[in-house]
Image (cartoon, rainbow, N blue to C red):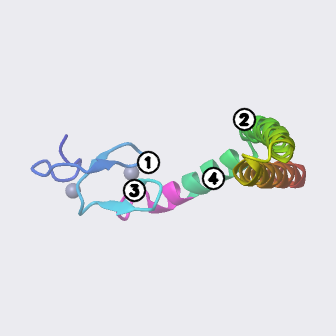
Amino acid sequence: MSCFYHHDRDSVGGCKSCGKSLCPECAVDLGKGLACRGHCEDDVRALITLIDRNVKFSPQTARILESSRKIRSSAATFNLMTGAIFVAWGLSDTERFSFIIILGVCFLAYGTFGIFQARRLAKERQET
Ligand SMILES: [Zn+2]
Ligand SMILES: [Zn+2]
C-alpha cells in the first residue's frame, strides 16, 4: 500500500476516520489510531473518546467483569479449602509438619487475596 497523498511512499497504516492509507509524514498517531494530518485529527480524537466510553460501559465489559469475578471467587474458595486441608494435614503429621503448614498458609493467604480481589471487582461493577 502506498500513501494516499504521496503515491511514491509506503503507508504505515490507515486513518481511523476516513480509512486512507498514510505515510509517516501524513499520519498523526493519536495513541489508539492514526489520523490524516490536518484533515481528520479532530474526527479521530472524537472517535477514540467514543470507543473508550463504549468499552467502559458496554454490557459485554460488565459480563466479562462478572465472569472473571466468579472465576476469581471460586478459585479463591478452592485455595482456601486446599490451604485448610494442608494445615489440618500438617498438624496431624509431625514429620511433614513445617512444610505442609507453610504450604497451607500460602494457599490460605492466596485465597484470602483472591476473595479480596473478587470483592473489589464486584464493588467496581456496582459503581458503574
Ligand atoms: Zn482521514
Ligand atoms: Zn503521505
Amino acid marked by disc 1: Lys
* Tag 4 and tag 1, C-beta contact below 8 Å: no
Amino acid marked by disc 3: Ala
Query: Is the CB–ligand 1 distance for label 1 below 8 Å?
Result: yes
Residue 63 % position (x, y) = 77, 35
Amino acid marked by disc 4: Asp
Among numbered discs 2 and 3, the one appearing first in the sequence: 3
- Front: mark 1 or 2: 2
Among numbered discs 2 and 4, the one appearing first in the sequence: 4
SS assignment at label 4: helix
SS assignment at label 3: strand
**Start and end of the magenta stretch?**
35-45
Among numbered discs 1 and 2, the one appearing first in the sequence: 1
Residue drawn 25% across the image and 51% down it: 12
Q: Which residue position is annotated with label 1? A: 16
Q: Which residue position is annotated with label 2? A: 60
